[in-house]
Amino acid sequence: MTPTIGTLDTLPRTRLSHLPTPIDAMPNLSRNVGAANLYAKRDDCTGLCLGGNKARQLEFYLGDAMAHGADTLLITGAVQSNYVRMAAAAARKTGMRCHVQLEARVANASASYRESGNVLLDRLLGATIHRFSHGEDEAGADRNLEAIASELAADGAKPYVIHLGPGHPPLGALGYVDAARELLAQLDERALRIDEIVVPSGSGATHAGLLFGLRALGSAIPVHGVCVRRARAPQHARIAGHCRALAEILQMRNPVGESDIDLGDGVLAPGYGTMNDAVEQAIMLAAHQEGMIVDPVYSARTMAGFLARARSAGKGHNLLFLHTGGQPAVFGYEDDLMPALDEDAG
Ligand SMILES: *Cc1c(COP(=O)(O)O)cnc(C)c1O
């Protein structure tokens, strides 16, 4: 029987994902890094418009949007945002229009970054694109999106804004509370012991949701968050805040203690959406060893943090990498990836 977690199963939800996602062994990568056994939970295979972690998150936002009778979805993100692409797809699937705001957060002026990858998909999905050119400014981007929503409402639309920053209920994290339930059932079925799960920590919905779900179900599996957007200290506060908010939404005690929140920012430099040597190596290694594509912004950064932990893990340790998707961004980062490919061929 499926265990319950607070009020989770009573909340509005729109099914959008192919679940459960598989768990793959990564035998070649395991041999490459040493003594640990490496596995991947394939949340890049959630199905919604090329997949990724946002499918699970959007199920709860779309459920809420439909419950509010919305007809237009609004979301903001970096130019190569996977969330924006998948929100646009979710809007289409549920019969809504979609307005997306693309923030010039990353100093990358290449034509492929601005127009290919996720941006090309946003356009194919027929999203109305707004450009926010002020760089990294989470509050400012939110305010601008609200202003667009007000204009749409004045014209008679029923807009619904997906807010990702603090100060708004982290509805997306509910998708990962549910994913914890899915994962524990899979591990149980396969009699697979996992000693650590490594996840990206960006908006924190994935990290906080999975951690909350595991602890709520009595699992003590350590969850290590790889910082992909901001440094450890502010990210820790964000994850703690999300867990408190989740407890409120789910009307239950917060099962996550301060010491459960584990973060590393060793592969973050030079910053969000920008490649470094460890990220580049992770991309090449995952592709060459496992035929698996990871993206420069999120999943390769997480893979880089994962590999660092795998290399220092003891013999027989089982480590699970949460693959959150992001592959369309590879096409947006074509220019950044070229030097690695030229080197590789030489
Ligand atoms: C958004 C995203 C993340 C970060 O997830 P959060 O829930 O925002 O922390 C990680 N990987 C990919 C591919 C993403 O698109």
Image (cartoon, grey):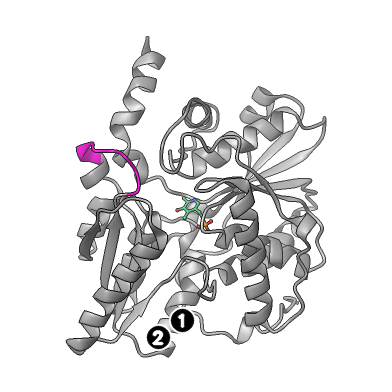
Q: Nearer the viewer, residue 138 or 29?
A: 138
Say left or right for 330 vs 9: left
Is residue 117 rendered to the left or right of residue 269?
A: left
Q: Of the residues shown, which amino acid type is indicated by label 1?
A: Gly
| 5 in relation to 125, above or below | below
| Structural distance between the alpha carbons of marks 1 and 2 | 5 Å
Q: Are marks 1 and 2 in contact (CB under 8 Å)?
A: yes
Magenta stretch: includes residue 106: yes
Magenta range is 105-112
Q: Quadrant of the N terminus?
A: bottom right
Residue indicated by mark 1 = 63
Q: Closer to the camera, 40 or 197?
A: 197
Image: 345 above or below 152:
above
Q: Residues within 10 Å of mark 2 (few under 14, many from 20)?
A: some
Residue 149 in view? yes
Q: Position of residue 4 (x, y in %)?
A: 72, 79
Rendering quarter of residue 16: bottom left
- What quarter of the picture does the C terminus occupy? top left
Name the spot of residue 123 as percent of width and height, x first.
20, 58
The residue indicated by pointer 2 is 66
In the rendered image, residue 225 lying in the magenta stretch gets the answer: no
